[in-house]
Image (tube, rainbow, N blue to C red):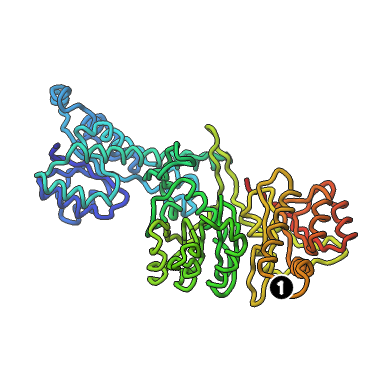
Amino acid sequence: MIKIKRALISVSDKTGVVDFAAALERQNCEIISTGGTKKVLEEAGIKVRDISEVTGNPEAFGGRMKTISFQIESALLYDREKDAEEAGSLNIEPIDMVVCNLYPFEKVKAQGADLLTLIENIDIGGPTMLRASAKNYKYVASVVDPHDYPHLLTELAENDGALSEKTRFNLMRKAFNHTADYDALIATTMDAEAGELSVRLAYGQAQKLRYGENSHQDGYFLRQKGADHSYYDMKVLHGKELSYNNMFDMYGAIESIRDMRQHAIAVIKHANPCGLATGDDQRKVMELAWAGDPLSAFGSVIAFNTKLERETVEFFALDAEDKSQRKFVEIVVAPAFTPEALEYLQLHKNLRIVEFDPHFLSPEKDMKVLHNALLYQDSDLKLKAKIDNVTKTKAKIDVELLDFGLKSVRQLKSNAICIVRKLENGYCQLLGMGCGQPNRLNSTELSIKRSRENLKAEWHGQGDLEDYIKEKMAEAVLISDAFFPFPDNVEVAHAAGLKNIVQPGGSIRDKQVIAKADELGVGMVYTGMRHFKH
């Protein structure tokens, strides 16, 4: 335990500093301070020793020089055991605590400050004091966060004005992280001023996961420092611990519905939506999303963009006497739950129930970490650059369905094809999809196969099945994430009964593709915007 007899306080964020300093004073701790902090403390009736009395020099150059001095840095750095005699001969008085948070560089940057203002808000003395005191944590406490004041005062009160080595070690870690983040922000900002991109990422609060991508791998989940909103902030309300793959699948589910209108529900397997639907009634939307691929929905992650209701979750039949009727779901994530819905979901003891609002998930940048390298790009937030009917037969595509379809295909791994339709009362449904294939034709064939199976399942036996499928496919829209390299995709789509196709265009064989669509009477729209997702 080290007794705090002398503290140097110099802060830009003065939240709680008066109460903290007053409590230190009551424990007979001498307070040394500078400039604005000194004025605030003195106005509160706290006795303060001016820093110039320690340094022997006045504050100078508009406040640029205050704390940097042999006397201050020595008082923080010297080893209290080995160097005590030398410190005495040099008239160095030990300082046991530094309370310092740095000039508000981040704040003035966010306000759009010019370069000169940014430069003036680069702290030099503060980081120097913090690094010195943190290095010598064996004898000195480094306090950078006003949120730490209450528990530090509690410990000081319980230990006659002393702090433990464990506390000082934790304060040291926090101080070095603080100065590292501060310098990183300055460095990247100055690079940006020079027109160069540099990225420095800092993550903390590491949470160990059940395992990594496979059970023999360790996995961790960390929060980006300083972020206002983070995927990390989810609340796990119930169920087993989350794994690495759970995090990926759930992210894909939330991404799929984050900017959807009305009630939107995504059923996700391996980060791809196998079911996706929107509409006015949450229960009906759930049924449509599940119907997109009931087999693949086994063990899925399901995301909702609105408060989850009891009637909707009863679709899972978790209380069915016949256990074969119960639908197995790994994770349910929603922005909120009614008490009744939460109670019902908890009937499944292992079901993970997660609270997270998808509207918070709006990243401007997308990053992928490769071996000692980083891929960095704008997030894919736009849907289309144009809507051009390029064929003689004009495609008949509802605007809302086009929006839904582009958002659907944007979420599928390329090569991606999805078939979407609009039902009565405005419900939109992902009827079938194919993705992650080496060639686009395979994806087209898979999306058609899935759509046919779904249409067969809903067929009521009236009339010819093939006629029913062709009729419904003619009302649907096939959407491709990238251009058709050959006319064969159009031929396969037409043979399945599809009459409306959306693709970005841009192939060297666009004319051949359009000619084939004209020959077959298929309407085709070009959007001018590709949506690869790797």
Taking 424 as reference, is 471 left or right?
right
* For residue 485, above or below residue 336: above
Q: Which residue is mark 1?
A: 461
**Where does the image place residue 181, in percent across and percent down from the top left?**
40, 41
Viewer-closest of 499 and 63: 499
* For residue 16, above or below residue 429: above
| Quadrant the N terminus occupies | top left
Please say whether residue 499 is visible from this viewpoint. yes
Give neighbour class at mark 1: few <14, some 14-19, many 20+ (Cα, 10 Å).
few
**Where does the image place residue 435, in percent across and percent down from the top left?**
66, 50
Taking 476 as reference, is 259 left or right?
left
Taking 325 as reference, is 183 left or right?
left
| Quadrant the C terminus occupies | top right
Q: Amino acid at mark 1?
A: Gly
Seen as rendered, the residue at the extreme front is: 322
Q: Quadrant of residue 234?
A: bottom left
Q: Residue at x 40, y 61 (%)?
A: 348
Viewer-closest of 162 and 431: 431
Q: Residue at x 44, y 72 (%)?
A: 310
Q: Quadrant of residue 63?
A: top left
**Where does the image place residue 15, in percent across and percent down from the top left?**
28, 55
Viewer-closest of 389 and 201: 389
Viewer-closest of 141 and 76: 141
Q: Secondary structure at mark 1?
A: loop
* For residue 339, above or below residue 382: below
Q: Residue at x 75, y 59 (%)?
A: 502
Q: Residue at x 59, y 61 (%)?
A: 294
**Where does the image place residue 442, in percent across and percent down from the top left?**
73, 49
